Amino acid sequence: MRPKIVIITGVSGSGKTTFLKALEDIGFYCMDNLPIEFIPQLIGNLIKRNPSINRFGLVIDVREENFQRRFPWLVEELRKIADVDVIFLDANDSEIIRRFKLLRRKHPLQGKTSLEEALKEERKILSSARMLAGEFIDTTGMSMGALRKKVMEKYGPEHEGQKVNVVSFGFVYGIPQETDLLFDVRALPNPFWVEELRELTGENPMVRDFLMAHNEVVRYMDALKKFLDETLDMFFMDGRRELVISIGCTGGKHRSVFFVEELYNWLKDKNRYEVVKIHRDVSK
């Protein structure tokens, strides 16, 4: 299979960096603003030395000197060694100006001219690249998350790189700072008050049997699984790649650990995400 190269070009402030970072998140080897004359040899050498590196993302734009003349040459050279997609990003002038003001950055062509004049000049320089592009994306009004999602849909298999961390913790030690979804199980029966279970953890079958013997625990677990089953994909719709689900009990040793164990096995069986379990406070 031939290597894949995605060239991202377009108007400054249109989202090229966001697009490139999204490619990087799904395993592309990414480069930004390298001198054009070096790129074909560099990628060719990388492919020869390490065939496992076979997907590349490049941002090439008007920061490159003599862009109009060199860009068509670059596309032609790269197509000799790989399948090449040229993606052109743009947005209307008012949106681009708003983004530059928000970030307080200077347009690469803005010397003594206004930002509006710099954009006009840039569009002239980019005319040849736009003609070579296989896809045009208007990012006007598009959030970074929506653009990332578009990249994932085009170049990343569904759920690839999506990670769910399930974390048990004790409220007495504080809520994990990285938490996205928080569930409190302190109202459920506590094995701590059963003498033979006190020194065990939620990973022990005896603790599991104790908890599952209570209808309120079973109902809570069923409701939690139903909620996640219906909503989990929604949390990744904005291009998010990682979600942290934290479940807390009083000390982080029994109930929260049991719930994390159950959710971990349930999510693993779905085979849709990379799933990691963490018992933060179980040994305290």
Image (tube, grey):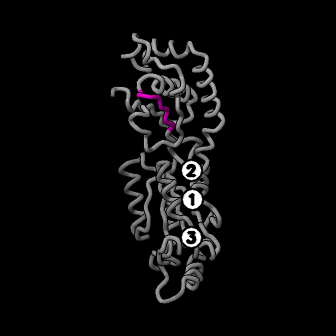
Q: CA distance from mark 1 to mark 3?
A: 16 Å
Range covered by the magenta-colored residues = 245-252
- What amino acid type should be assigned to the residue bearing mark 3? Gly
Looking at the image, residue 268 lies above or below residue 78: above
- What amino acid type should be assigned to the residue bearing mark 2? Gly
- Residue at the left extreme, as displayed: 284
Judging by the rendered image, the residue that carries numbered circle 2 is 239
Task: Indicate which disc, 1 or 3, sits on the residue closer to the N terminus.
Answer: 3
Judging by the rendered image, the residue that carries numbered circle 3 is 10
- Residue at the bottom extreme, as displayed: 112
42 sits left or right of 268 in the view: left
Looking at the image, residue 259 lies above or below residue 112: above
Looking at the image, residue 190 lies above or below residue 136: above
- What amino acid type should be assigned to the residue bearing mark 1? Met
Residue 72: percent from left, percent from top: 54, 71
- Determine whether label 2 and label 1 are within 8 Å by CB: yes
Of residue 265 and residue 249, the one placed in the foreground of this image is 249
